[in-house]
Image (spheres, helix red, strand yellow):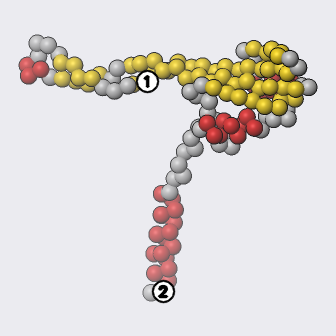
Amino acid sequence: MYRILCFICLSCFVLCGCQFEPPEPKATQENYKILLDGWLGENKSTLYRVWGTPMNDYWKGTANYILYTKQTVENASDGAKIERMPRIARELSFYEKPQGLVTRSCTTVFKLEDGIITSWRFEGNHCVAYPK
């Protein structure tokens, strides 16, 4: 009897454990800040190698600024509208999801002094990263 009870309890634990799925990680602005903090102290050539050619690279005084811009345009549904089909008995209706264009962008600027990244800033509605 004891063995049967142990087997049942163990089976319940195994089955409950199999059904648990951890939530998918989300891209957040906080994770983007952590990602950028990891670049502090790196040099310009490493930044170019990983991020690619910047949109702009300019000097202001003794500081070098490197600017990256990422922009995407996506279709997004912004609700549903009801349209009635004319000349059909009882005016059957259907739903159509209107499509809208959403622009997502992020501009990141790295400040370098003596060839080393000393600070960063960003702006935009899609400056996000996934957790490591």
Quadrant containing the C terminus is top right
- Give the residue type that dot 1 points to: Ala
User: What's the residue at 34%, 27% (across, down)?
Assistant: 79
On the rendered structure, is 51 left or right of 126?
right
Q: Mark 2 packing: few (<14 Cα in 10 Å), some, or many (20+)?
A: few
**Which residue does the image show at 60% across and 19% down from the upper left?**
71
Identity of the residue drawn at 51% across and 66% down: 14
Residue assigned mark 2: 2
Query: Regarding mark 2 in the picture, which secondary structure is present there?
Result: helix
- For mark 1, does the 10 Å Cα neighbourhood hold few (<14), some (14 to 19), or many (20 or more) residues? few
Coordinates of residue 113 in the picture (x, y in percent): 87, 26
> Which mark identifies residue 76?
1
The one nearer the camera, 14 or 36, is: 36
Q: Depth check: 22 or 57 in front?
A: 57
**Quadrant location, the N terminus:** bottom left
From this viewpoint, which residue is outermost toward the bottom?
1
Q: Amino acid at mark 2?
A: Tyr
| Residue 37 on image: x %, y % | 75, 38
Q: CA distance from mark 2 to mark 1?
A: 58 Å
- Residue 103 location, x and y as percent? 52, 20
Secondary structure of the residue carrying numbered label 1:
strand
Q: Is any atom of residue 49 visible in this view?
A: no
Q: Look at 30% across and 26% down and name the residue there.
A: 80
Side of 41 where 70 appears, left or right? left
Report whether 98 appears left or right of 35. Answer: left
Question: Picture quarter containing residue 109?
Answer: top right
Judged by depth in the image, the label closer to the viewer, 2 or 1, is 1
Vertical order, 20 against 79 (above or below)? below
CB under 8 Å between discs 2 and 1: no
Check the image and report above or below for 25 versus 60: below
